[in-house]
Image: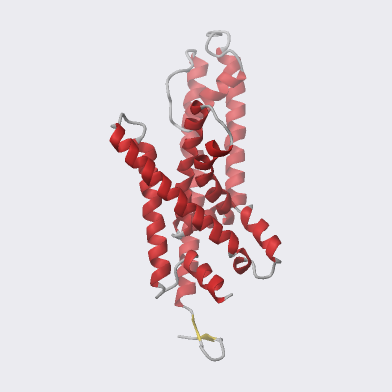
């Protein structure tokens, strides 16, 4: 049991002073970055010798990631001590990060289990990019982002709903205005919805645009509204980050008595 607990401590976030756990975290981060770099490099015309080196690195990486996954499944009861062992394993296996871990290794083993067309295999190898999400285990950056989105989910959903509502209204109005003038461009409301998305987000691809005076006026209004409405979620997320950082700073400044466990007023 002591061995399992120690393994659990190593594969979890490194605590201050735990050098073995820190080395484990840094090694995995470096390995993930190398793997993502290889996925990008493979989009170029690389020599066969380099491709062979990539294959060996990929094999070693998958072995390490597989061992890590097995260890995390094995120590699931340490992560969920209030659950029975089988329940703890199931709860871990269906967690977000465990699914990411599984998707990071399954494309390598799948061809050995099921005969697959090589073209399909190339598509499955893109799943390796999921390994970049594994970094979330070893840094608080993505964790803080998820916390902010969870904290401000109601405000974000409200702002997104308003944006979607405006897009639909603008699309229907623009379709009725422009359909007569250019029926081959604004064929239906979905074409107009694409225009509304590009305009409201201030991207403006220019592949579809109004030519009538009324349509141009509507387009200008939607573009101006887009500047303000798209900024709303940004402001909500920024406020959430400030709140989260303030709470973290406050929690770190609180000291507790090592004997009675009560808060010490500084």
**Residue 240 visible, this orientation:** no
Image position of 84 with respect to 108: above or below = below
Q: Quadrant of residue 168?
A: top right
Say which residue appears at 56% left-offset and 31% top-offset: 115
Question: In this rendering, would 30 be left or right of 189?
Answer: left
Say which residue appears at 62% left-offset and 57% top-offset: 92
Question: In this rendering, would 212 be left or right of 30?
Answer: right
**Residue 189 visible, this orientation:** yes
183 and 102: which is toward the camera: 102
Question: In this rendering, would 92 be left or right of 143?
Answer: right
> How many marks overall?
0
Way the structure is coloured: secondary structure
Residue 138 spot, x, y in % from top left? 44, 60
Residue 139 spot, x, y in % from top left? 44, 59
Residue 178 spot, x, y in % from top left? 55, 13
- In which quadrant of the rendered image does the C terminus lie? bottom left
- In which quadrant of the rendered image does the N terminus lie? bottom right
Question: In this rendering, would 224 be left or right of 74?
Answer: left
Q: Residue furthest bottom?
A: 259
13 and 35: which is toward the camera: 35
Say which residue appears at 48% left-offset and 49% top-offset: 133
Say which residue appears at 38% left-offset and 60% top-offset: 26
Residue 33 spot, x, y in % from top left? 37, 49
252 and 131: which is toward the camera: 131
Image position of 31 with respect to 189: above or below = below
32 and 219: which is toward the camera: 32
């Amino acid at each position: 049991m002591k061995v399992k607990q120690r393994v659990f401590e190593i594969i979890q976030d490194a605590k201050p002073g735990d050098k073995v756990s820190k080395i484990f975290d840094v090694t995995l981060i470096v390995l993930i970055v190398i793997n993502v770099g290889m996925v990008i490099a493979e989009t170029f015309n690389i020599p066969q010798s380099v491709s062979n080196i990539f294959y060996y690195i990929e094999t070693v990486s998958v072995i390490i990631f597989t061992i890590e996954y097995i260890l995390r499944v094995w120590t699931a009861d340490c992560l969920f001590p209030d659950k029975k062992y089988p329940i703890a394993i199931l709860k871990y296996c269906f967690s977000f990060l465990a699914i990411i871990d599984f998707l990071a290794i399954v494309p390598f083993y799948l061809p050995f289990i099921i005969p697959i067309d090589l073209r399909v295999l190339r598509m499955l190898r893109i799943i390796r990019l999921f390994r970049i999400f594994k970094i979330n285990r070893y840094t608080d950056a993505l964790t803080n982002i998820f916390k902010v989105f969870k904290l401000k989910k109601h405000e974000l959903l409200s702002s997104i709903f308003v944006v979607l509502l405006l897009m639909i209204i603008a699309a229907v109005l623009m379709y009725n205005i422009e359909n007569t003038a250019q029926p081959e461009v604004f064929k239906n409301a979905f074409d107009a919805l694409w225009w509304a998305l590009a305009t409201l987000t201030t991207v403006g691809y220019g592949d579809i645009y109004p030519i009538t005076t009324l349509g141009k006026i509507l387009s200008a209004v939607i573009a101006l509204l887009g500047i303000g409405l798209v900024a709303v979620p940004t402001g909500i997320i920024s406020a959430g980050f400030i709140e989260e950082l303030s709470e973290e700073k406050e929690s770190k400044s609180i000291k507790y008595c090592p004997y009675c466990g009560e808060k010490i007023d500084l």
